Amino acid sequence: MYRVGIDIPAGEYKVTCTNGRNCYVEVSSDSSGSLYSIVSNDSIDTFSYITVQDGQYLTVNGGQFSPVK
């Protein structure tokens, strides 16, 4: 879990699955892990783009992410 504005900068990221299967991407409003804090989430099979804002939290399971230039 990465805090946007602290661990990573706000902006757009490309998420690429690295495990040969689906990967999970979640943007949350806090670090509680509560379903109520989920802003967006998705299960992707190859790659996707995600935009995050300062104060949000980004979680990527089964993949890696890099900033879009």
Image (tube, rainbow, N blue to C red):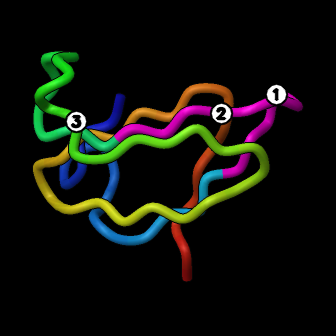
Q: Residue at x 13, y 31 (%)?
A: 37
- The correct choice, above or below, for 24 with respect to 44 in the image is above
Residue 12 location, x and y as percent?
A: 43, 70
SS type, badge 2 = strand
Disc number for residue 56: none
The residue beneath circle 2 is: 23
Q: Residue at x 82, y 27 (%)?
A: 19
What is the spatial separation of the Cα atoms under label 3 and label 1, in whole angstroms?
24 Å
Circles 3 and 1, Cβ within 8 Å, touching? The answer is: no
What is the crowding at mark 1: few (fewer than 14 residues within 10 Å), some, or many (at least 20)? few
What is the spatial separation of the Cα atoms under label 1 and label 2, in whole angstroms?
8 Å
Disc number for residue 38: 3
The image quadrant that residue 31 belongs to is top left
**Residue type at tag 1:** Asn
Circles 2 and 3, Cβ within 8 Å, touching? The answer is: no
Locate the C terminus by quadrant: bottom right
What is the crowding at mark 2: few (fewer than 14 residues within 10 Å), some, or many (at least 20)? many
